[in-house]
Structure formats: C-alpha cells, structure tokens
Amino acid sequence: MGILKEKLEMKETENILLKESVQRLEEELHEVRESNCHLKLELSTGKKLFDKQEAGLLEAKQKLITSENLNSELCTTIDALNTDRHESMQTNEILEKKIVEKSNTNTTQSQEVEVLREVNMNLVAELGKLHEELV
C-alpha cells in the first residue's frame, strides 16, 4: 500500500504541476491574444494611414499631370506668340520701309508741285501780259 500511496502522491504532484502549467499557458495565451489585438489595431491604423497617404499621392500625381499639361499648353502658346511677334516685327520693318518710300515720294511730289506752281504763276503772268497786249 505504501507504493500506491507514493504513486498517488506522485500523481497528485504531477497533477498540481500540470495544473500550474495549464494556468501559465492560459496566462500566456491571454497575453498573446491581447498582443494580437493590439497588433491588429496597429495594423488597421497603419493601413488607414497608408491608404490616406496613397490617396494623397494619387492626388499629387493628378495635380502634377494637370500642371504638366498646362505647362505644355503654355509652351505652345508662348511659341505661337513668339512666332506672331517675329511676323509682326517683319511686317513692321516692311511698313517702315514703305513709309520711308512714301515720304520720299511725297517730298519729290511736293517739290514737283512747287515747280509746277511757279510755272503756273509764270504762265498766268504771261497770259495776263498777253491779255493786256490784246486789249
């Protein structure tokens, strides 16, 4: 009977050790579950932050594309304006040359008109003399 008692005590001790082990494992499991909940929360928060940053990047990318398109249009407009300015300068040079030519022609014609007036005055005076001689 002593052996049975000894085996019983051993089993009881083993049982107590197993219960303590189970208790520790349950506590560890509880801690792991709590840790898991915290990690899930952090992961969820991180995902929300990532999604928000990704949306911000997409918006920035869209703004960049829009800006590049506007810049391209602006460059096209500037090129067209430069072409117009160049053509306008050429037209202005041509018109200035024509103005100088017309001015020179006008001066020449003014001189010719003056000569013709003098001739006309001489002819009128001569006609007046001839008219007096006839009368």
Image: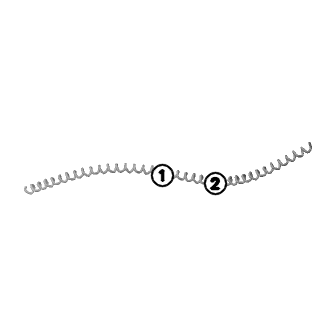
Front residue (pair 92, 18)? 92
Q: 27 or 72, which lies in front?
A: 72
Pair 2/1: label in front: 2
| Image coords of residue 113 (percent x, y) | 78, 49
Q: Under tag 1, what secondary structure?
A: helix
Counting from the top left corner in percent of width and height, residue 115 is at: 80, 51
Res. 89 mark: 2
Q: Which residue lies furthest to the right in this view?
A: 134
Number of marks drawn: 2
Q: Is residue 125 left or right of residue 56?
A: right
For label 2, the crowd category at 10 Å Cα-Cα, with few meaning under 14, some 14 to 19 and many 20 or more, is few
| CA neighbours of label 1 inside 10 A, class few (<14), some (14 to 19), many (20+) | few
**Disc 2 to disc 1, C-alpha distance:** 36 Å
Q: Which amino acid does label 2 sit on?
A: Met
Q: How is the image coloured?
A: one colour
Tell me which residue sits at (17%, 53%) in the image. Answer: 20
Label placed on residue 93? none
Q: Which residue is drawn at 46% across and 52% down?
A: 61
**Residue sitting farthest toward the left:** 2
- Quarter of the image with the N terminus in it: bottom left
Look at 55% across and 51% down and name the residue there.
74
Is residue 101 found left or right of 22 in the rendered image?
right
Q: Which of marks 2 and 1 is nearer the N terminus?
A: 1
Dots 2 and 1: beta carbons under 8 Å? no
User: Horizontal and vertical percent for residue 37?
Assistant: 29, 49
Q: Please name whichever residue, 2 or 67, is drawn nearer the observer in this view of the structure.
A: 67
The quarter of the rendered structure image containing the C terminus is top right
Residue annotated with mark 1: 64
